Image: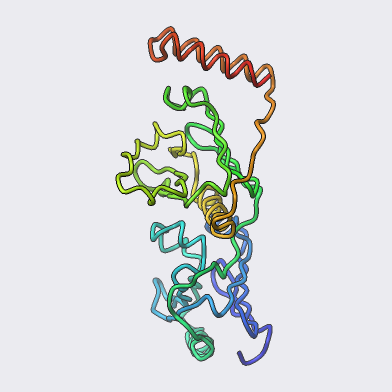
Amino acid sequence: MSRMGDVLAGFHAAWEFESDSVLIRYERGIRTPKLFQALGERRVPLEALAGVTLTPGRRGTVVLRAEPRPGADPLMEAAAGQLKEGCDPYRLVLPAERETLAEYYADELRGLLGETGKTERYLVAAPEAPLQFKAYDGKASFDGTSVSFRWSWTGASSAKWKAGDQTYPVAGLGGVEWRSPELFEGYLRLLPRDASATAAAPAVPQADQDPAAVVFGLGYGPVHESLPFAAAVLAAVRERGAGAPVPVPAPRRDPADIAERIRHLGELHQAGLVTDEEFSSKKAELLAEL
């Protein structure tokens, strides 16, 4: 770049150009997309970029966009093309009168880019754990080594209540499937590592019936919470690779919480949604957690 520390400020973000990277700082304000506010800032190494474009925008603006290489950014990999244009963290919208300056920086960046193919590792840092968000049927949390789903008695299906709260060590995961809450039937699903290893894999259940998934809904699992969560899990999965599973001790529960869950289990039993055997077995599991 021409000078280390040059800054190009646009709407909702500013790009600071360094010798080997671009530091993107996102503004905080009521008009700034919540995803940008959640990200705060991101350092994007130049080796993570495949190209740079400058195109006309709407209402007297131009748009400078950096194109990340496939596999370079866990956030974009998790998004899988589902982000709305206004929430693309690689877009910088500028007033049209700054087009000449934007073109200058675009040319400078293009001259520094090298390989453009898929990367073997993530080059852009993922959001840091711990992370959590509230889904429609439970609460998802990630501490850096395991993902936990704690079901909500008001939203979780009987199938999830039968299965009980879940904890998935990162070492046993092969990936994450994120379907935006802004689309119909959004969800976050954890994929087991050996899912693609079997020739005849079993049919995947609907997300609301799958203990390895949480479902979104109006006001639940918003993009700015669930997408960084998915990206952080993806990054941890790739970093661990084929390492040995990490043992996760079963947490000790609050007696009041156990009592509430047994009460709800009893309601399912009375409604005929849980058999006598399932009720007795699950009740014994819950009591064992005391």
Give me the residue at 52% from left, 32% from top.
Answer: 138
The residue at 54%/59% (across/down) is: 238
Residue toward you, 214 or 281: 281
Residue 215 to residue 60: above or below:
above
Q: Report the label total.
A: 0
- Quadrant occupied by the C terminus: top right
Q: Is residue 250 above or below residue 88?
A: above
Kindly tell me whether residue 228 is visible in this rendering: yes
Residue at the (58%, 73%) spot, across then down: 44
Left or right, residue 215 beside residue 263: left
User: Residue 248's x, y, as percent?
Assistant: 64, 38
Depth check: 223 or 164 in front? 164
List x then y, in percent, for residue 211: 46, 33
Could you say where residue 284 lies in the image, as x and y percent from the top left?
57, 14
The quarter of the picture where residue 117 lies is: bottom left
Question: In this view of the protein, can residue 155 be seen by the observer?
Answer: no
Is residue 63 positioned above or below 258 on the image? below
Q: Position of residue 5 (x, y in %)?
A: 68, 83
- Nearer the observer, 269 or 229: 269
Q: Quadrant of the N terminus?
A: bottom right
